[in-house]
Image (cartoon, helix red, strand yellow):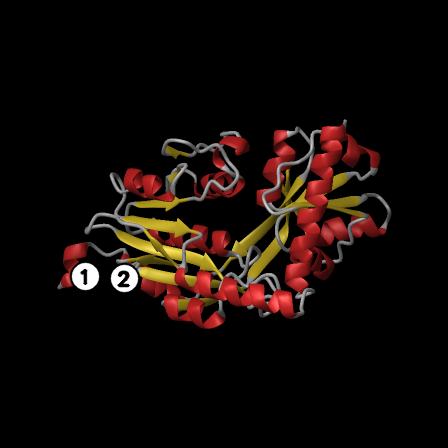
Amino acid sequence: MWYLALVKRLADVRLRLAEGLEAGAWDGAAARALAHAWSAVSARRVARPLTWPAAVRVVAVGGATLGGSGKTPLAIACARELAAHARVAFIAHGYRARAGAPRVVRPDDPVADVGDEALVAARSLGRDVPVVVAGARQAAIDHAARFADVLVLDGVLQTSPRRASLSLLALDAASPWGSGAVPPRGDLRAPVASLVSACDRVVHLETFSRGAYHEGHLLEWAALASRASRGHLRFGLFVALARPGRVVSTLARHGILPAHVVALGDHAPPPRDLPRRLADLGCDLWLATAKCATRLEALGIPHATIAYDVHLSTPLRRALSALSAPVAARVL
């Protein structure tokens, strides 16, 4: 039992840290000195040292903040758009997973083996776009370049020494630069100037939610809100991501006010006693994002997955279309 208590304690600490960074809660001489050091290091690491064959094109998609920018939904939308014109592979980052040797992710893979974002991408893209994950991102690129003409890199803003064919910086439309400072004073991944200069396009990402999927059926927000208002349904919200406030705000806009919010740190594995803890709260239905739902699914906890849609702008779709043209045609 002491182990479970320790896991819960560490999860609580990670969550408070993430909330503090998002709110810009820490200041003072020490925080400013550490932020200055973070700025210098992160600015140099915006471009990742990665290589790929000359005939392959690369779309790099990074986020402005430490979680919550919407980079993975944007990368998935770009891969789906590209798949209509080229052979595409999606390079996922198996954060906190036992990825090991390069592999193509299957929709039924254990989340602990491939990571939550890779699993969500594989389920979203289906057979149209293979999702590749490995212990090292370079190994995943080498594997995918054998069968794809275009690679979409999730979580990489820019590459070096060769620049990506197209670099996209994802910004949450509601809070584009987070708290406006780098850690420990805020949640920016790197200084704004470094992020902007590294990318080709800044994408202010607006997501649209129609409802939540439960047992294969879409439950629309209006119907769910009506049932909740009549006392027929009691909702809970489970999240394991960097900025849970964004999800709470989305639900509130649709009239959904969770009776309980259970939040873990970003990508955090759930404690073993999570099923009992959720059952004790007495909610009829737990809501979760697609990424967070992989954690509930692994424990057999019934839930509904919040549905999000990402709409690509016409200029971005044109840029992707031009990029997916055959190499010879592009040179001409």
Q: Is residue 94 left or right of residue 87?
A: right
Q: Is residue 113 left or right of residue 285?
A: left
Q: Which residue is mark 2?
A: 322
x, y (%) of residue 222?
72, 54
The quarter of the image holding the N terminus is top right
x, y (%) of residue 308?
57, 52
Residue shown at 39% from the left, 68% from the top: 201
Q: Are marks 1 and 2 in contact (CB under 8 Å)?
A: yes
In the picture, the disc for residue 170 is none
Q: Is residue 72 above or below residue 172?
A: above
Residue 58 seen: yes
Q: CA distance from mark 1 to mark 2?
A: 8 Å
Q: Give the mark, 1 or 2, whose residue is nearer the N terminus.
A: 2
x, y (%) of residue 5?
76, 34
Residue density around tag 1, few if under 14, some if 14–19, many if 20 or more, within 10 Å:
few
Residue density around tag 2, few if under 14, some if 14–19, many if 20 or more, within 10 Å:
some
Residue shown at 37% from the left, 56% from the top: 60
- Amino acid type at mark 2: Ala
- Quarter occupied by residue 274: top right
Residue 312 seen: no
SS state under label 1 = helix
In the picture, the disc for residue 330 is 1
- Amino acid type at mark 1: Arg
x, y (%) of residue 138?
33, 43
Residue shown at 73% from the left, 59% from the top: 252
